[in-house]
Image (cartoon, grey):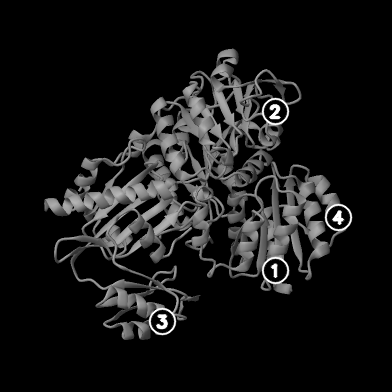
């Protein structure tokens, strides 16, 4: 029986757009005008400093009650509301550094309300029920949310939105999408050392409810002329990697190399990320690897083998 | 966080859903008193958070209060898959005509709370999904409006409840579990089986509730429901230090920053023939104090023969990690070989701090894993 009210993944996915249709990277680039919500907090200040040092165009910060001040060594004007920041600076991407304890769905909703098309959230530990409602609002608005609980995005040489260390990356043809943070750095570092640069690195986060899934990013990389090969880093829990495999079979012609973390994880134990748990016999690394290999994806045994496999795929 | 059956039953009852009468007992005498109150046949069920308790002899019927006391005496203190039974649920034993299945879960693909129903209750829903997927009906209500009456009725009709009275009861229970899911911040509310008794009345016979750990801060009263019986002391200690730690059975301690890298590190250790003693994520931006606490937790496990420290510095700084290691080395009661791989932010400063300590440096993750397996074998 077909459940009449069951919504398909396709219908669920929001509008797919890059920030600028004419650019040769996905989601963030030289045209990014970044707003940082929670800019005066410890995390906000620390990482904004790093984003500025990388050359990201950070145009505004928001901390309610601190409007009119200058943050991050006097470099970034602070506004009371996102709406005001957008009006005054034309910000088109928001990075949210507000921790989950401080009601981290509120800044996401504020950014949506102010018409920001791309919203990235670092917050770890947002209750899943809150994300269910928040995601629905984001979806209906046509905005894109990356995360929560994600390291963010990096387009090497152009823009860094989030906490991915800039120095390990270099411009090039490999698109990287991952549920993990430091594991991604490991893979990117190895790619760079082998002389393989990256088009864009997207950390989608390991929470159960996330704004942007593997499929969304795969679609962007497939359409991006700058990207020649794709690295997909998954982990135990859920079926996002299996969904990605089905999408790759039907829609992706570029070579994909993958690694799945948690091959030795025991069932029923949450491995750090809220979403990383094998439950009801579902979500094991083995079934994910099998699904990906079945559609021609090469799956690395070691995270540091990813780079060599990409090199072979690109025929370098 | 997983609740016991009796705790889930209490929540269902609080929300006005039909559950079987009875209560929870910690002693055979209490079990007898409950049986006296219930009157008639009862079922005595071990309250342990593992599957297969029925097969292990943890679920028994009793005809009289005396027999209930006797049966409770057998079950209390029993060991089921390594867990000691400390409580039993004493519930009215009822007869029924049919078993249904009903649950509300967090569905990652649709990013909604989804209701799942089936006319084939009493068995694991995963089993039904494999053998007879047609028998499972799903419904993903609008996240902003919630479950509507007509949708809940549709669910009842879709699993073949034709009788108006029964479908209305079913819909009311479905609305109830959806409300519970949202109000208590669950990630699963399951009734299995939901039975239809001979008189046509629906009743929840067994239920399961999983709570969303990220939302527990909103429900301080639930902390009292936590069963730490099956939890190793080191995991408790780690939770207090805000470190994600899971004890495993191997002999190689692992300390890593980031959950994904921590899992991958365990995988690589295993690939080189080693067995990880734990999963440990010190989190992002950990300071020296936290690193020291993590190392102490790892070394408190007597099985640990060697430790692998794998840090890829982003927001975590290599010098802070190194300071923490040095501080911990001064405190720990026992020394084991340690392989350290430190890359990324301030890795050079970290290496300088560690130069005097007796540690084994490694360049790559593969090399680090190989070395730690070697030294664990030699130890």
**B279 and B54: which one is in front?**
B54
Mark 1 and mark 4 lie on one chain; the one further toward the N terminus is 1
Task: From the image, tell me which residue sits under label 1.
Answer: B300
Horizontal side, residue B87 vs residue B223: left or right: left
Please identify, in this view, whether the residue under mark 1 or under mark 4 is nearer the observer: 1
Secondary structure of the residue carrying numbered label 4 = loop
User: Would residue A250 appear left or right of B250 to someone viewing this image?
Assistant: left
Please give the chain letter of the residue carrying mark 3.
Answer: B
Image height check: is A20 above or below A164?
above
| SS at circle 3 | helix
User: Could you say whether the residue bearing mark 2 is in a helix, strand or loop?
Assistant: helix
In this rendering, the label closer to the viewer, 4 or 3: 3
Q: Is mark 1 on a helix, strand or loop?
A: loop
Q: Where is residue A129 in the image (x, y as percent from the top left)?
A: 43, 43
Q: Earlier in the sequence, mark 3 or mark 1?
A: 3
For mark 4, name the chain.
B
Q: Residue furthest toward the top?
A: A88
CA distance for labels 3 and 1: 37 Å
Q: Is residue A59 left or right of residue A112?
A: right
The residue wearing badge 3 is B28
Dot 4: few (<14), some (14–19), or many (≥20) neighbours within 10 Å?
Answer: few
Inter-mark Cα distance, 4 to 3: 62 Å
User: Measured from the top left, where is residue B250 in percent x and y?
Assistant: 61, 69
Cα–Cα gap, marks 1 and 4: 25 Å
Residue carrying label 4: B355
Please tell me which residue is depicted at 79% across the width and 52% down the height of the picture.
B322
> Which marked residue is nearer to the observer: mark 2 or mark 3?
3
Disc 2 designates what residue? A54
Q: In this view, does B248 lie above or below A124?
A: below
Q: In this view, does A100 lie above or below B6?
A: above
Is there CB contact under 8 Å for labels 1 and 2? Answer: no
């Amino acid at each position: 029986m077909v459940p009449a009210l069951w919504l398909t993944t396709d219908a669920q996915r929001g509008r797919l757009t890059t920030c600028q249709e004419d650019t040769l990277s996905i989601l963030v680039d030289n045209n990014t005008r970044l707003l940082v919500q929670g800019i005066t907090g410890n995390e906000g200040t620390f990482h904004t400093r790093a984003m500025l040092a990388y050359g990201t165009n950070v145009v505004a910060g928001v901390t309610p009650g601190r409007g009119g001040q200058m943050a991050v060594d006097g470099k970034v004007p602070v506004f009371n509301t996102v709406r005001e920041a957008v009006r005054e600076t034309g910000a088109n991407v928001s990075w949210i550094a507000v921790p989950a304890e401080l009601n981290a769905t509120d800044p996401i909703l504020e950014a949506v309300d102010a018409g920001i098309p791309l919203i990235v959230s670092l917050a770890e530990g947002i209750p899943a029920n809150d994300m269910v409602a928040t995601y629905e609002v984001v979806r209906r608005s046509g905005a894109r949310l990356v995360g929560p609980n994600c390291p963010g995005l990096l387009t090497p040489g152009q823009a860094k939105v989030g906490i991915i260390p800039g120095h390990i990356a270099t411009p090039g043809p490999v698109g990287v999408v991952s549920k993990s943070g430091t594991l991604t750095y490991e893979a990117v570092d190895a790619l760079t050392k082998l002389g393989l640069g990256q088009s864009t690195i997207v950390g989608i986060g390991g929470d159960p409810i996330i704004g942007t899934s593997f499929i969304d990013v795969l679609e962007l990389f497939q359409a991006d002329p700058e990207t020649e090969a794709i690295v997909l880093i998954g982990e135990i829990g859920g079926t996002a990697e299996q969904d990605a495999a089905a999408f790759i079979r039907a829609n992706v012609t570029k070579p994909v190399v993958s690694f799945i973390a948690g091959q030795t994880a025991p069932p029923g134990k949450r491995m750090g990320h809220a979403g990383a748990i094998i439950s009801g016999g579902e979500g094991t690394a083995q079934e994910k690897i099998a699904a990906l290999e079945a559609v021609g994806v090469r799956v690395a045994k070691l995270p540091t083998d990813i780079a060599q496999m990409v090199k072979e795929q690109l025929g370098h | 966080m997983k609740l016991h059956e009796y705790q889930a039953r209490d929540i269902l009852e609080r929300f006005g859903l039909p559950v079987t009468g009875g209560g929870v007992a910690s002693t055979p005498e209490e079990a007898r008193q409950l049986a006296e109150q219930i009157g008639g046949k009862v079922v005595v069920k071990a309250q342990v958070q593992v599957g297969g308790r029925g097969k292990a002899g943890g679920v028994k019927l009793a005809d009289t209060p005396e027999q209930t006391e006797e049966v409770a005496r057998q079950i209390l203190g029993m060991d089921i898959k390594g867990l000691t039974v400390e409580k039993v649920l004493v519930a009215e034993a009822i007869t029924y005509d049919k078993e249904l299945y009903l649950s509300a879960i967090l569905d990652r693909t649709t990013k909604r709370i989804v209701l799942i129903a089936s006319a084939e209750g009493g068995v694991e829903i995963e089993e039904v999904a494999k053998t007879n997927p047609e028998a499972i009906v799903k419904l993903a209500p609008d996240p902003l409006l919630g479950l509507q009456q007509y949708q809940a009725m549709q669910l009842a009709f879709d699993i073949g409840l034709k009788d108006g009275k029964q479908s209305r009861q079913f819909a009311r229970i479905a609305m109830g579990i959806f409300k519970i899911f949202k109000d208590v911040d669950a990630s699963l509310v399951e009734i299995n089986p939901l039975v239809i008794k001979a008189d046509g009345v629906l009743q929840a016979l067994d239920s399961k509730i999983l709570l969303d750990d990220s939302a527990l801060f909103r429900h301080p009263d639930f902390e009292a429901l936590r069963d730490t019986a099956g939890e190793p002391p080191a995991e408790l200690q780690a939770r207090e230090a805000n470190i994600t730690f899971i004890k495993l059975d191997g002999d190689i301690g692992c300390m890593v920053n980031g959950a994904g890298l921590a899992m991958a590190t365990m995988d690589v250790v295993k690939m080189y023939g080693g067995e990880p003693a734990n999963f440990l994520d010190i989190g992002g931006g950990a300071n020296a104090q936290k690193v020291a606490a993590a190392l102490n937790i790892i070394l408190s496990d007597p099985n640990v023969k060697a430790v692998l420290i794998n840090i890829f510095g982003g927001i975590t700084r290599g010098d802070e990690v190194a300071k923490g290691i040095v501080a911990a080395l001064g405190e720990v009661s026992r020394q084991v070989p340690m392989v350290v791989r430190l890359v990324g932010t301030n890795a050079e400063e970290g290496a300088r701090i560690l130069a005097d300590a007796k540690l084994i440096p490694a360049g790559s993750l593969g090399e680090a894993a190989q070395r730690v397996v070697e030294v664990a074998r030699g130890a």
